Image (cartoon, helix red, strand yellow):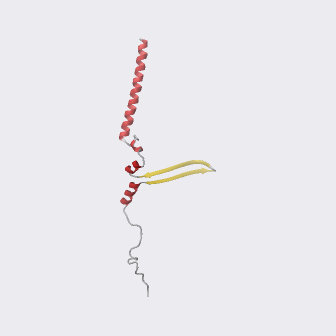
Amino acid sequence: MTDLDHRYPGLETEPYGPPSGSLADLLERVLDKGIVIAGDIKIDLLDIELLTIRLRLFIASVDTAKKAGIDWWETDPALSSRAARDALAEENARLRERLDALEGADEETTGAVR
């Protein structure tokens, strides 16, 4: 004397839920689209602001970040060998200019004494 609902066959054996995907699929989707996590931490004591920390986290692939206009790693000498070489070349050029200026001033000084 039991009523069975036969409109949805297999309902008892196949529960509904989110489609399962692998961690690699999820990671690929996040890196392809990008994800932003933002948060603020504020510490007040008697209505006096003691500390504010603003956190902004952007997780994406390099290509997605470049599309968003973010490319700071290309100009940071600590992260890019090309940026490090460029920084060294620029510093070398500045030092050579200073050296030439000092040698020119030294020649003028010694030339005037003689």
Q: Is residue 80 above or below residue 14?
A: above
Task: Single out the residue that lies furthest toward the bottom.
Answer: 1
Task: Single out the residue that lies furthest toward the top.
Answer: 114
Tell me what residue is drawn at x 53 percent, y 52 percent: 40
- On-image quarter of the N terminus: bottom left
- The percent coordinates of residue 51 (x first, y second) are 56, 48
Q: Is residue 110 above or below residue 13?
A: above
Out of 66 and 58, give the one closest to the viewer.
66
Relative to 33, 55 lies left or right? right
How many discs mark residues in the rendered view?
0
- The percent coordinates of residue 79 (x first, y second) are 39, 43
Q: Is residue 114 above or below residue 63?
A: above
Q: Is residue 91 above or below residue 56?
A: above
User: Where is residue 81, by image quadrant?
Assistant: top left
User: Where is residue 17, by image quadrant?
Assistant: bottom left
User: Where is residue 21, by image quadrant?
Assistant: bottom left
